[in-house]
Image (cartoon, rainbow, N blue to C red):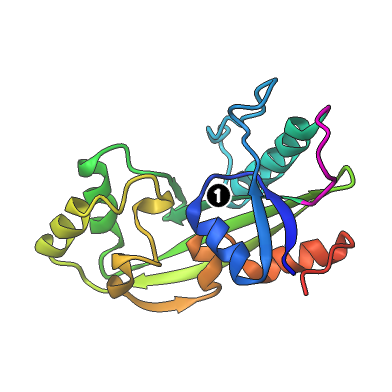
């Protein structure tokens, strides 16, 4: 029987990953909670990518606790996560439009970039966070490949402007790190945090 957890995210990819390891995630709405429990994802001045994702994962997990407060719901672990791409010291977020998505892909072409995903687990009023770091190398991309990928609309609403589980997989010549972390939720770190909080996945 699957074990239920709350997921403080509406990401279909994170839902899929949690189901992959036998969990039954229940989406916990943050923006529509009363009172609102959403998180401002704007980087702080001078904040590095590692600290940025770590901070956001913790804030989202804490917001999940806030969203549950006062409700007559079962006490279950709350899982929250944040993913960002970093390259040359820059935090690369979600593309605002097709031009920005194409610019991101041109920047990755023939080079390696880092994907950081932080996961936070809130359980019994305690919050723990872990960060997964992966290096992704893209092959050299042609203008036609970039245009076709942007036209697929896949880059939008994805950190760094691409999804490893989709068509962009053909661009990746090497991955060092966590495939699930690049996808948006590092399963090893998630399971370890759940276990350390007293909630065994298996």
Q: Estimate the x, y position of residue 66 in percent, counting from the top left.
A: 77, 31
Q: Compared to 62, does 83 lie above or below? A: below
Report which quarter residue 28 is drawn in: top right
Q: Estimate the x, y position of residue 15 in percent, counting from the top left.
A: 56, 57
Q: Compared to 25, does 30 lie above or below? A: above
Q: Which residues are magenta?
A: 70-77
Q: Compared to 53, does 199 lie above or below? A: below
Q: Estimate the x, y position of residue 149 in percent, counting from the top left.
A: 21, 58
Q: Estimate the x, y position of residue 141 in percent, counting from the top left.
A: 19, 67
Mark 1 Cα shell of 10 Å, populated few (<14), some (14-19), many (≥20): many
Q: Compared to 25, does 157 lie above or below? A: above
Name the residue: 70% across, 20% down: 35
Q: Mark 1 — residue?
A: 49
Seen as rendered, the residue at the extreme front is 1
Name the residue: 83% across, 68% down: 200
**Any magenta on residue 130?**
no
Name the residue: 72% across, 43% down: 61
Question: Is residue 80 left or right of 182 when viewed as pictured?
Answer: right
Seen as rendered, the residue at the extreme left is 144
Question: Is residue 100 left or right of 146 when viewed as pictured?
Answer: right
In the foreground, 108 or 118: 118
Q: Quadrant of the N terminus?
A: bottom right
Q: Quadrant of the C terminus?
A: bottom right
């Amino acid at each position: 029987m699957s074990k239920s957890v709350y997921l403080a995210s509406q990401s279909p990819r994170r839902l899929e990953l949690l189901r992959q390891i036998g969990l039954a995630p229940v989406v916990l709405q943050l923006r529509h909670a009363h009172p609102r429990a959403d998180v401002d994802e704007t980087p702080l001045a001078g904040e590095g990518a590692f600290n940025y994702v770590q901070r956001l994962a913790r804030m989202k997990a804490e917001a999940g606790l806030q969203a549950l407060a006062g409700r007559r719901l079962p006490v279950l672990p709350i899982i929250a996560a944040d993913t960002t791409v970093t390259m040359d010291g820059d935090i690369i977020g979600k593309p605002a439009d097709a031009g920005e998505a194409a610019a991101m892909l041109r920047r990755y072409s023939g080079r390696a970039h880092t994907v950081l995903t932080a996961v936070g687990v809130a359980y019994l009023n305690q919050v723990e966070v872990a960060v997964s770091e992966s290096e992704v190398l893209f092959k050299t991309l042609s203008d036609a490949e970039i245009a076709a990928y942007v036209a697929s609309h896949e880059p939008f609403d994805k950190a760094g402007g691409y999804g490893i589980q989709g068509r962009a997989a053909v661009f990746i010549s090497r991955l060092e790190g966590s495939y699930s972390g690049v996808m948006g939720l590092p399963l090893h770190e998630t399971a370890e945090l759940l276990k350390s909080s007293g909630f065994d996945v298996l």
